[in-house]
Amino acid sequence: MNVPTTGIFENRWNMKHLAGWGSLAVLLFVSWLLPSTRAAWDALDVAAFEALNATITWGRGIAAFWALTGDRLFDVFSALVLASFYLAVISRGGIDSFRHGLAFAVATVILLGIVITLQREIISFPRLSPSLALDSYYSIQDFISWSRAKEGSNSSFPGDHATVSMLLTLVWWLGFGWRVGLIALGLTVIFSLPRLAAGAHWMTDVLVGGGFITFAAAALVLGTPALHHAYRFFRRYTDRITDRGLALYERVRG
């Protein structure tokens, strides 16, 4: 089994990473709860929302863009973009790279599933989104009648979609290097903006909510051997799937 030497795949504990990233997660969340620093976060929320939401009035073109990208069907497109990008990354190094990437993908999906489930059970709590909390805002539907963009939420914190994208950025950065990580970060920003502009989420739903979960996940994957064990477990099965796929391809081609 060809296993990369990247630290997240090693069977070891690293208390510095565990304590460091865990502490950052706690400090970020506490800064949002304390009245002395919450005021700054609230000011950022309002300023960011007003700036982004105002772009809806710039013209029918930008309003239609927010309508399309804020639609739930755009989530499917986003997932396809991320999957295509990932397949391109793991395929560029040949079959060994593909075998590694497939096992890493399964381990990552399991990690995301666990984290998002815990998020919804432990962290998520009622918080009105900007469109419901503020006295006035620009609705996309007032400019684009066919819009089905999500514009409101009674429980906006944290932002699920942004959190998933941030977690993918983290593990791809650690697993495949900073170039892949920067592209993933750019996609995260792009995919997060529509719901911020529409009023379905505050900026802190992304920065604080998603940031807290991402820092906590960093403590897990950098400070514990959890990803190592998950990767090695699934690698046995994904290698078999890959071998069968290659055998079937050779049979069809022959």
Image: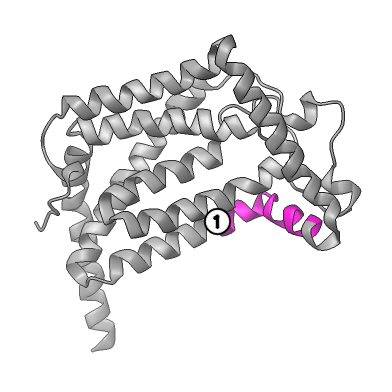
Residue at the (78%, 58%) spot, across then down: 62
- In the orientation shown, which residue stands out farthest toward the bottom? 254
User: In which quadrant of the rendered image does the C terminus lie?
Assistant: bottom left
Residue at the (41%, 37%) spot, across then down: 113
| Residue 85 visible in the picture | yes
Residue occupied by mark 1: 78
Left/right of residue 159 with respect to residue 226 in the rendered view: right
Left/right of residue 122 with respect to residue 240 in the rendered view: right
Query: What range is drawn magenta here?
Result: 63-77
| Residue 200 visible in the picture | no
Look at the numbered disc 1 and give the secondary structure of its residue: helix
Residue at the (59%, 26%) spot, across then down: 157
Horizontal and vertical percent for residue 34?
54, 11
Q: How many marks?
A: 1
- The foreground one among 230 and 195 is 195
Residue 33 sits above or below residue 213 on the image: above
- The foreground one among 31 and 67 is 31
Left/right of residue 163 with respect to residue 231 in the rendered view: right
- The foreground one among 210 and 45 is 45
Horizontal and vertical percent for residue 222?
23, 35
Q: Quadrant of residue 241?
A: bottom left
User: In which quadrant of the rendered image does the N terminus lie?
Assistant: bottom left
Residue 71 magenta-highlighted: yes
Residue at the (68%, 54%) spot, across then down: 69
Residue 41 sits above or below residue 98 on the image: above
Q: Quadrant of residue 19?
A: top left
Q: Callout 1, which amino acid?
A: Ser
Residue 221 sits above or below residue 97 on the image: above
Left/right of residue 107 with respect to residue 55 in the rendered view: left
Dominant secondary-structure state across the stretch colored magenta: helix
